[in-house]
Image (cartoon, coloured by chain):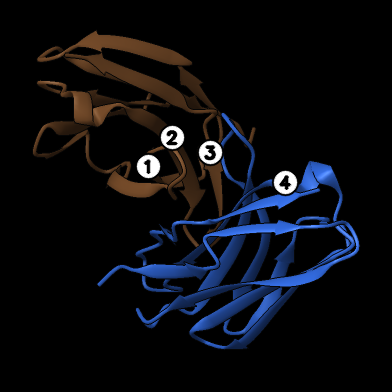
Amino acid sequence: QQQVKQSPQSLIVQKGGISIINCAYENTAFDYFPWYQQFPGKGPALLIAIRPDVSEKKEGRFTISFNKSAKQFSLHIMDSQPGDSATYFCAASIKGGSEKLVFGKGTKLTVNP
Amino acid sequence: DTEVTQTPKHLVMGMTNKKSLKCEQHMGHRAMYWYKQKAKKPPELMFVYSYEKLSINESVPSRFSPECPNSSLLNLHLHALQPEDSALYLCASSQIGTGIETQYFGPGTRLLVL
């Protein structure tokens, strides 16, 4: 019930391509869904976040698509660049219970030049 | 400014040593967190402080002792650690009760226990 399932575990994309990472959840009490980007040896950095009342949010080359009925959300990276090579974590939390972020297991993205 | 700072960046300690990790934020956040992250795994929550009070302890062994001296500082005291405690230790902070729950992470302390 508290899990967030993330796929794929790893992803290789060519420069300029689209990277797509998917997450699914069961707990309908989740109402905040952030994505974090983490480079080796660094802390996770907030990339973009969405709430269930919005179906899509775009920030630059990064877009979150949210399907409330399917309890799924995904991250799309357009025009992927080698500098985007990192591990991406989706996460979810409950409003009012914001102390606990439930993380997906992560996706290691490699963008080849 | 969304910066959380952590010191030291790297730490090597023996199993009999006592050391401390430090975390600081000046964003006015009233929730602060310690996470442990092993290689190729997501961060794993250890402790949460809300308004300088310990609100969550995720059944962490007593060899890890958190402390929140004030609203900007968070410490993690380490004693008699085991080699399996080697990991990246992350601090994070967030607001409380504003509807903006974003957690901001520091760069982490890479800990090696010999």
Q: Which chain is blue?
A: B
In the displayed structure, would residue A67 be above or below residue B12? above
Query: What's the distance in space between the residues labelled 1 and 4, CA to CA?
Result: 23 Å
Tell me the SS state at disc 2: strand
- Given the image, what chain letter belongs to the residue carrying mark 4? B
- Given the image, what chain letter belongs to the residue carrying mark 1? A
Residue occupied by mark 4: B86
Q: Residues within 10 Å of mark 3 (few under 14, many from 20)?
A: many
Residue occupied by mark 3: A103
- The quadrant of the image that shows the C terminus of chain A is top left
Q: Residue at x 74, y 71 (%)?
A: B19
- The quadrant of the image that shows the N terminus of chain A is top right
Q: Give left or right: position of A75 versus B47.
A: left
Q: Which chain is brown?
A: A
**Amino acid carrying mark 3 in the image:** Phe
Q: Are marks 1 and 2 in contact (CB under 8 Å)?
A: yes
Tell me the SS state at disc 4: loop
- Nearer-N-terminus badge (1/2): 1
Q: Residue at x 20, y 23 (%)?
A: A82
Q: Are marks 4 and 2 in contact (CB under 8 Å)?
A: no
Residue occupied by mark 2: A89
Q: Give left or right: position of A92 versus A46.
A: right
Q: Residues within 10 Å of mark 4 (few under 14, many from 20)?
A: some
Where in the figure is residue B12, as x and y percent of width and height?
A: 70, 56
